[in-house]
Amino acid sequence: KYGAKKVADEQVAFRKTFDDAITGLPELRNHINKAQEDLNPLRALQLFEKITAEDCELLLLDPVSGRPETFIWRSIPVPPVCIRPSVAQEGASNEDDLTAKLAEITFYNTLIVDALGRGEPLIALMEQWENMQIAAAMYINSSTPGIPFSANVKPIRGLCQRLKGKQGRFRGNLSGKRVDFSGRTVISPDPNLCIDEVGIPELVAKILTFPERVFAHNLQKMKQVVRNGPEVHPGANFVVKKSNGMKRFLQYVDRDAFAEQLEIGDVVERHLADGDVVLFNRQPSLHRLSIMAHYARVKPWRTFRFNECVCSPYNADFDGDEMN
């Protein structure tokens, strides 16, 4: 809203519009000087359209493609259905929040068009206008301030809510994703480790495997890890045969006989061992030092351990933090 900060002729014309009301209700005269005109989006659009190209350049706006009226929405972008899929629940389909809001906007828009056609009073029109404006604002951002909130209604997820926050598109889907061959547990300090080493529990080392190809120099070592099998560290979980590509789980085979059949070119998925290079990560991964490479050191017990000098880049402490 804006006050009567207009040139003298406009002020006089503005106040004359109240003459009939004052004649019928004289006590209104005291309030005329405080009268305000509603600045609704339509009025703002009309004012913006009157800004000249020269004034746009003075405001550092592009007079062709960046005029101020382009920042007031006159239409709503409708995303494809793959962004707002229906959820099937007990035989019925439950529509997405965006679909529901688009339907609500269309409904109010139709009511306004019909009311204009029937010549209904302005107060009825303005009520539907207000409802449509609230629906459009919640479609973009359901946390917009000033929107009436009902405690009984579940808050909807607008476009902004799908992008921001921990569960949003950037942090939840693009930066954070599920990966294979990873482990997570509590961290604890170990000053006896070098700063480029990380202590890995034997339990984790027996689950995380590395595919090592068999060749002449490591044939005997690979035979031994095959004999040890999945339960004894350092052992192996699977062998992929070069001849036919078949993958054999070592839990249920005669490992001694299978080890003797090992050929150059086979791939042994062996346990993680000392000296293997692993990536160590503490979330949230806010900068590049949140993920660093370390040499693995397989240790007893059940926590990841590393030298406390490395806490700073990870922003880690040992009060229950977990790392990957």
Image (spheres, grey):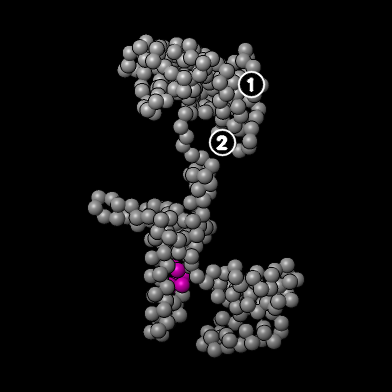
Residue at 55 percent of width and 34 percent of height: 283
- N-terminal-most mark, 1 or 2: 1
Q: Name above or below for residue 271 compared with residue 150.
A: above
Residue at 37 percent of width and 10 percent of height: 256
Residue at 28 percent of width and 50 percent of height: 89
Quadrant of the frame with the N terminus? bottom right
Q: Looking at the rendered structure, which numbered label has been put on residue 196?
A: 1
Q: Looking at the rendered structure, which numbered label has been put on residue 1?
A: none
Which residue lies under the disc numbered 2? Answer: 284
Q: Name above or below for residue 228 compared with residue 123.
A: above
Is residue 281 one of those drawn in magenta? Answer: no
* Between 76 and 277, the one nearer to me in the picture: 277
Find out whether the residues at labels 1 and 2 contact each other: C-beta distance under 8 Å.
no
In magenta, the rendered stretch is 127-132
SS under mark 2: loop
Disc 1 marks a residue whose amino acid type is Asp
Where residue 208 appears, x then y in whole percent?
Answer: 46, 23
